[in-house]
Image (cartoon, rainbow, N blue to C red):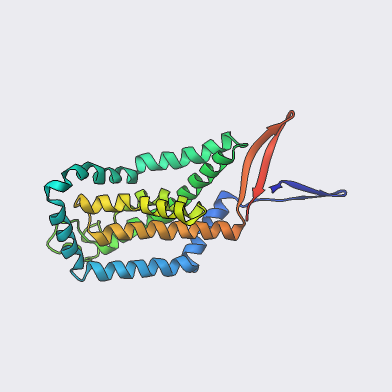
Amino acid sequence: EPYGVASRGAQECAVAPPTPWRRIVEDHRQLYTGKPLGMLIGGIAAGAAIANSGADDRLQHRIQRSLDTDRFDDWDKVLHSGKELGNGYFTLPLFASAYLGAELLPESDAAEAVGTWGERSLRAFLLGAPQVIALQELTGASRPGEASYGAEWHPLSDSNGVSGHSFMAALPAITAAKMADGWLPKTLLYTASLAGPVSRVTDNAHYPSQAALGWWLAFTCATAVDAADAELGGWRVRPTAGEGQTGLAVTRSW
């Protein structure tokens, strides 16, 4: 339902939607005090257990051996292409363009949905990027073949314990899945979110736990953003015009 200024007799009550800053603050509150915090801690603990048990090295070796056959030659380029989904030089402008494009087409429901996706993706990036960078340094793990300790965590020794490409590649599809209705589109979108992480493992650029942890951070941050929007009531502001008048339309969904 549209919201703006609600009139009642001679009284007027202005309805103010949450500002972008308040949304970002709520995103962080959800991540560090709500259910996503447990998800974050659990994901890190699982990643540590796998990386430091030797399972990562064994699994990576088996994957590379299975790919080193003629029947997988044609799949190399297909699997590798998932990496480009995690290139921030492409994805961040895409998020921003989707968000701004919705403001230019205020009467389009499709544009509004795309704009919401762009906004949520940007917020999840702002929430998760510091986590990725910090964990890359704190884990200190190496890429396959770069150091004798392999996937094991050696704080501050290296900066590859979390795959940044996996995080960025998974973020747009997971955000879309959170917004989608129905199990089929959600399943398809969550499946698509695995393309980037899988490419990092098949390219022998990251161990499985490193790619999985990047995906999990994207999922956790998208969950926090989704919870924040639910808490704030789905407020949105967009420009509007008609019959010689211009202004702002404030909408709320729940």
Exactly how many numbered labels are in the figure?
Answer: 0
Q: Nearer the viewer, residue 197 or 249?
A: 197
Q: Nearer the viewer, residue 134 or 185?
A: 185
Q: Is residue 95 above or below residue 67?
A: above
The residue most toward the top is 244
Q: Nearer the viewer, residue 192 or 31?
A: 192
Taking 143 as reference, is 18 left or right?
Answer: right
Residue 230 place in picture, x, y as percent: 57, 59
Taking 152 as reference, is 254 left or right?
Answer: right
Q: Is residue 154 above or below residue 170?
A: below
Residue 241 place in picture, x, y as percent: 68, 33
Residue 228 place in picture, x, y as percent: 54, 59
Q: Residue 77 lies in what quarter of the image?
A: top left
Can I make out residue 12 in this image? Answer: yes
Taking 223 as reference, is 86 left or right?
Answer: left
Can I make out residue 145 in this image? Answer: no
Q: Residue at x 59, y 61 (%)?
A: 231
Q: Nearer the viewer, residue 216 or 246?
A: 216
Q: Residue at x 21, y 52 (%)?
A: 202
The residue most toward the right is 9
Residue 69 place in picture, x, y as percent: 12, 50
Figure quadrant of the C terminus: bottom right
Q: Residue at x 30, y 42 (%)?
A: 84
Q: Residue at x 57, y 34 (%)?
A: 104
Q: Is residue 199 above or below residue 110?
A: below
Taking 135 as reference, is 116 left or right?
Answer: right
